[in-house]
């Protein structure tokens, strides 16, 4: 929602949403990219993505957010889409202990398939259901400290910290990319060719040809 046209940007960052089915990944995506929320949203089938551009440090950053299905039967499909991702939001439901217990498994899968330097943020979603909380903030924060992850609690329903979570991970990715470019180039950083996905390390590419662009799954 920056001032530039959608196809005019300085950096394109691929970020994946992972976590168990039903934790609210699709609603986080729709809240961030379209400011929409649907109580009747259905489980994602396979992989879909949507985009949004943000201004960061005077640059236009286009975020390509991939929503990966959490159901076990789609795990083999979604693992292929980790390629080229420079960021990941690992989402659990603060009212369901099992979704937090499975975070460790999702983290292992992410580290097995994604770039070693991928930026990871743990997201405790559905903070509006505080009266049903089953996972304490302290427990999740302690896990993140042990694993070296950033952490935030969100509510897609109330739009609490959704914008902040995506902005923080994009700023962290941009900071790493900028530092790497400065270290690898002599003099001022060269301009970035339009249309290229910027990976934290060599090998990342724009996977936009691998899947159809996300269509609104609800509230259409």
Image (spheres, helix red, strand yellow):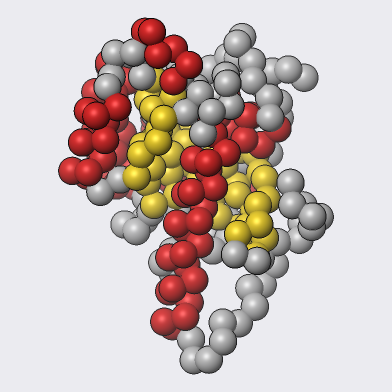
122 or 112, nearer to the observer: 122
> Against 179, is 25 above or below?
above
Total label count? Answer: 0
Q: Quadrant of residue 130?
A: top left
The reply to whether residue 80 is visible in this rendering is no
126 or 120, nearer to the observer: 126
Q: Quadrant of residue 99?
A: top left
Rendered-image quadrant of the C terminus: top right
Q: Which percent across, then down, holds residue 10?
A: 66, 65
Q: Residue at x 70, y 32 (%)?
A: 34
Left or right of 210, for residue 132: left
Left or right of 108, for residue 121: right
Q: Which percent across, then down, holds residue 96?
A: 33, 13
Q: Residue at x 54, y 28 (%)?
A: 160
Q: Which percent across, then down, holds residue 74?
A: 43, 26
Left or right of 212, for residue 201: left
Seen as rendered, the residue at the extreme bottom is: 186
């Amino acid at each position: 929602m920056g001032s530039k046209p959608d196809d005019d940007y300085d950096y394109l960052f691929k970020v994946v949403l992972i976590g168990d089915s039903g934790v609210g990944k699709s609603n986080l995506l729709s809240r961030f990219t379209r400011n929409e929320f649907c109580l009747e949203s259905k489980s994602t089938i396979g992989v879909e993505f949507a985009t949004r551009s943000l201004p960061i440090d005077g640059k236009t950053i286009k975020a390509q957010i991939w929503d990966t299905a959490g159901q076990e039967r789609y795990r083999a499909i979604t693992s292929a889409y980790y390629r080229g991702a420079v960021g990941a939001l690992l989402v659990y439901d603060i009212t369901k202990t099992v979704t937090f217990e499975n975070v460790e498994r999702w983290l292992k899968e992410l580290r097995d398939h994604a770039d070693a330097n991928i930026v990871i943020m743990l997201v405790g979603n559905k903070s509006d259901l505080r009266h049903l909380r089953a996972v304490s903030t302290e427990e999740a924060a302690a896990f993140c400290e042990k694993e070296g992850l950033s952490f935030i609690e969100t509510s897609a329903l109330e739009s609490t910290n959704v914008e902040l979570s995506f902005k923080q991970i994009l700023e962290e990715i941009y900071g790493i990319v900028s530092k790497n470019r400065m270290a690898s180039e002599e003099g001022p950083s060269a301009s970035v060719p339009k249309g290229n996905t910027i990976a934290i390390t060599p090998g990342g590419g724009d996977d936009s040809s691998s899947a159809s662009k996300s269509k609104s799954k609800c509230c259409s």
